[in-house]
Image (cartoon, grey):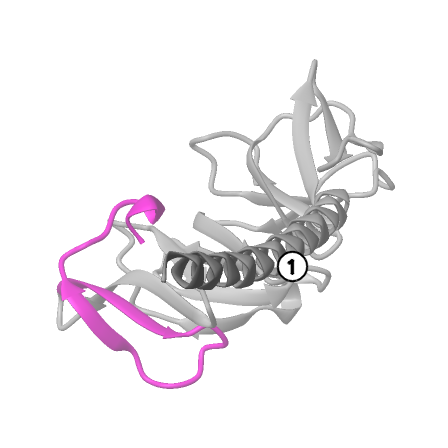
Amino acid sequence: GDDFIMNEWLAKMQRSMGALLICALVGGATLIGGTEVQAATLSQSSVYYDSDGVLYKVTGDGSETTEVLIDYEGTDPVEAGSYLYYLPSNNSTTLLRVPNDGSSDAAETYATGVLDYYTDNGFIYYLDTTGQIYRANGNSAASSATKIADKADTEFPMFSVNKGRIYYNGLVNGNTWFVSKASNGSGAVQRIASGAVESRYLL
């Protein structure tokens, strides 16, 4: 009676403990593998910072530092391809770019009349004062930029790119709508909601 119940209970506990041990070993290997992946990702990512007017690039794990530009004056730097894109000041509409490897002594003008810009997957996107949004490979000349959208609302010049789509405030029949379309410019504009979205943090 009682011995049989006790033996049955012990057998169940041994099976449960064996399964738990296997799960713990598999989980531990996953965590170790995840740490290695995270370390590899950190060494491939970059952080930019300004120190006394010199712009530096450092790998995410801190193993390598590059002096990108001396006499840097700018705001909101973003990386696309082998270049860093930024505005010279908060109220400027001139988009500048500089190679991110420190090979140039000065930035070059990439585009003018820029109200907002964004990078995704090696591409630079920018919205100009006429309400048009352009896209170019980050390593290409500005002349290679192609128009992917028009009728963006310049009163609410915010856009974002996510999972192959561009989201922006557009004008539809004179009214502001939050809209989306393929980030390469193909396809029709899809209306999402009436009104404007004023922050990327809301996306």
Q: Is residue 110 left or right of residue 174?
A: right
Q: Nearer the viewer, residue 113 or 9?
A: 9
Say above or below: 56 vs 36.
above
Farthest residue, direction right? 103
Q: Amino acid at mark 1?
A: Val
Q: Nearer the viewer, residue 54 or 171?
A: 54
Q: Tell me residue 9's x, y (percent).
A: 43, 58
Q: Secondary structure at mark 1?
A: helix
Q: Identify the image quadrant of residue 161.
A: bottom left
Location of the C terminus (image quadrant):
bottom left
Q: Residue at x 60, y 63 (%)?
A: 121
Q: Identify the image quadrant of residue 6.
A: bottom left
Say above or below: 113 vs 5.
above
Farthest residue, direction front? 1
Residue 178 belongs to magenta span: yes
Location of the N terminus (image quadrant):
bottom left
In the rendered image, which residue does mark 1 sit on?
Answer: 26
Residue 191 belongs to magenta span: yes
Query: Badge 1: few (under 14), some or many (20 or more) residues near its Cα, within 10 Å?
Result: few
Residue range of the region highlighted in magenta in the rendering: 175-203
